[in-house]
Image (cartoon, grey):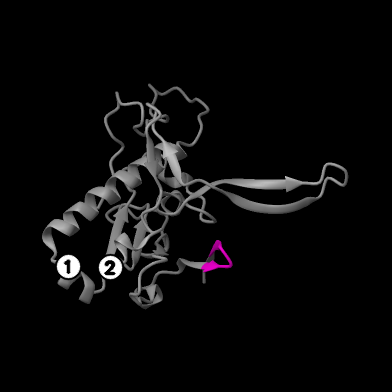
């Protein structure tokens, strides 16, 4: 599955800010738009999955959604500490820092709780793809921002691959078995959602 940038005249599409008649301009990374494109593609993939695979087949097999972000203009701006695809399936918001104004010390760093993200028309899009048992027959997501046919700068296929596990799935999958080294496994403990990250 490959999310597109959307129609250029739509307010929630990912814009091409680089190819601007040869003129170089500073621009902000379009995190919100990228998360919306991911959410839309995941919903479409789930609808396809539900239409074509009986529940008995889905429950008895190992199901993983593969997503390529190779068509998105801002794909190379990904932050591997908390990529946009992770924020699309879990209620993760912006990085928040708590600073003691007297000592100027950073006392805490965390990502804000963000259960939904708004479109330009203010309508909300829920970020709960992996936050309930409605998609429990999907073990996780494999994501890549690289076009597999254009691996310039990549030492080998798979270096950019990201695996995100589903908190509510009982499917067991070892992403390292297929060479994935950027792994995010969700853990719910004492009411807090954290991720065991493995980048080895």
Nearest the viewer among 40 and 80 is: 40
Q: Which segment did they paint magenta?
A: 188-194
Q: Residue furthest right?
A: 102
Q: Are marks 2 and 1 in contact (CB under 8 Å)?
A: yes
Percent across and percent down for residue 2 are 26, 49
Based on the picture, tell me whether residue 192 belongs to the magenta stretch.
yes
For residue 137, the mark is 2
For residue 55, the mark is 1
Q: Residues within 10 Å of mark 1 (few under 14, many from 20)?
A: few
Based on the picture, tell me whether residue 142 belongs to the magenta stretch.
no
Can residue 197 be seen here? The reply is no
Residue at horizontal 32 percent and vertical 66 percent from the top: 136
Can residue 10 be seen here? The reply is yes
Percent across and percent down for residue 98 are 72, 47
Alpha carbon of mark 2 to alpha carbon of mark 1: how far?
9 Å
The first of marks 2 and 1 along the sequence is 1
Q: Dot 1: what SS?
A: helix
């Amino acid at each position: 599955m490959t999310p597109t940038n959307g129609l250029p005249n739509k307010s929630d599409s990912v814009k091409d800010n680089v190819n601007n008649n040869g003129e170089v301009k500073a621009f902000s990374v379009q995190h919100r738009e990228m998360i919306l494109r991911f959410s839309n593609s995941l919903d479409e993939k789930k609808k396809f999955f539900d239409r074509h695979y009986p529940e008995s087949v889905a429950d008895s097999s190992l199901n993983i959604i593969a997503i390529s972000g190779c068509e998105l203009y801002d794909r190379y701006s990904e932050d591997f500490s908390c990529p946009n695809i992770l924020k699309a399936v879990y209620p993760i918001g912006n990085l928040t820092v708590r600073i003691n104004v007297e000592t100027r010390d950073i006392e805490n760093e965390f990502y804000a709780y963000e259960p939904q993200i708004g479109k330009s028309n203010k309508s909300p899009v829920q970020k709960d793809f992996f936050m309930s048992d409605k998609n429990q027959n999907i073990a996780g997501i494999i994501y890549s921002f690289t076009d597999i046919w254009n691996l310039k700068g990549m030492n080998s296929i798979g270096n950019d691959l990201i695996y995100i596990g589903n908190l509510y799935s009982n499917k067991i999958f070892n992403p390292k078995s297929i060479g994935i080294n950027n792994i995010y496994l969700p853990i719910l403990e004492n009411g807090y959602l954290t991720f065991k990250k493995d980048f080895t």
